[in-house]
Amino acid sequence: MSDSERQEIAARSKTIVVKVGTRVLAREDGTLDQNRVTAISDQVVQLMNDRRQVVLVSSGAVGAGMGRLGLPQRPTDLAHLQAVAAVGQSRLIESYNFALQSHGRHAAQILLTADDLNDRTRYLNVRNTLLAIFQYGALPIINENDTVRVDELQRNVGDNDRLAAMVTNLLRAPLLVLLSDIEGLYDRHPSLPDASVIPLVDQMDTAMRDFQRQTPVSNGPNHLSRGGMASKLEAARLAVMAGESVIIANGQRPNVLVDIIRGETVGTLFVTQGPAVASRKRWIGLTAQPNGKLMLDQGAQIAVEKRGRSLLAIGIERVEGNFQKGDVVSLCREDSTEFARGLTNYGSEELRRIARQPSDKFVVILGHCPYEEVVHRDNLVVLG
């Protein structure tokens, strides 16, 4: 079964980001299943042979390391987790390369952290590298750099889900596919006998609220993986806000990627929530992490959020954090909820002095007035 909307999305998706979860690749005991790696690789090659550019974001390093070292369970202390990830990463890329070589393709390993994409220069360097890898006909395989991103190893989140969404926005890829061991997003907890997969989500906020009402939390992390449906929904939100589509599907299903590109009704499709966002604004609003917060009065919030105006200092009630000119900051309502992000023209110390002041007083207060706007509307993104 297929539908026209899925076929249209598949047809225009010449660049695709595919995230593969640990549960797709590893056996229950933690060892890497080469047959599953080969199955995913074979499907990716079919997409590449169809003149599509594919990026694979692959989890599984810790699970692969557990299998190679013969560990019965995941280590709990940080140093050993890092060591197991390092051992497993080489095993993981070896497995992909073995599967790809039979098709005359090669794996290109890229280890990233959120900090790499938080820096604008490094962000662009990653993009240029990926585009060059495409020219060589190789497959970029991205993984979270667990050996240096220590806080990510300890948190109960799906870091590679978010990383995949960031890479999707980086490349402006029309489609992100998140593969796990579940069929998609269910209309209720999947353990219930009458639960069924939701084929289409066109209201992201509604879907996230409905999911949060499910108890217990659906499909939480197990001893091999650190993600779950919550992290996949957050990744989907980041992508659809930028104007892309997302599919969550079962990566253990035979030919799942091929069927998705054929327009088959596989998994849950999250359709874009609005027009595509420009590349620079994707970085400002959906990738770079804010270094501070600006609390606005209601008038300033309405001017920015509803009328598309620049942010002026007179509307700033309070400044939180320490940041420099050019940093990304959060713009928040009076109740402290974030509604926008932007590049600030002033550092935090200067802003604390000119907050609630009109721009014609900047010279008296600061001795100069380089900008009338604190955040210009061209450097500002209102969040959905």
Image: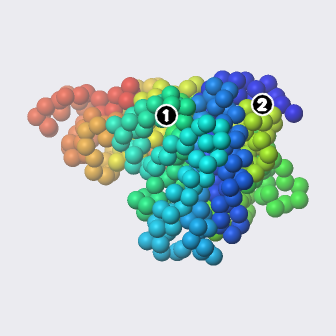
Number of the label disc, if any, that sits on residue 133: 1
Image quarter in which the N terminus is found: top right
The reply to whether the C-beta atoms of the residues labelled 2 and 1 are less than 8 Å apart is no
Residue at 20% over, 42% down? 350
Q: Is residue 243 above or below residue 160?
A: above
Disc 2: CA contacts within 10 A as few (<14), some (14-19) or many (>=20): some
Q: Amino acid at mark 2?
A: Gly
Q: Quadrant of residue 266?
A: top right
- Residue at image x 29%, y 37%? 326
**Residue named by callout 2:** 263
Mark number for residue 381? Answer: none
Foreground residue, 40 or 151? 40
Is 63 in front, or is 208?
Answer: 63
Pick the quarter of the image with the C terminus: top right
Q: Nearer the viewer, residue 296 or 132?
A: 132
Residue 12 spot, x, y in % from top left? 66, 23
On the picture, is 305 further left or further right than 67?
left
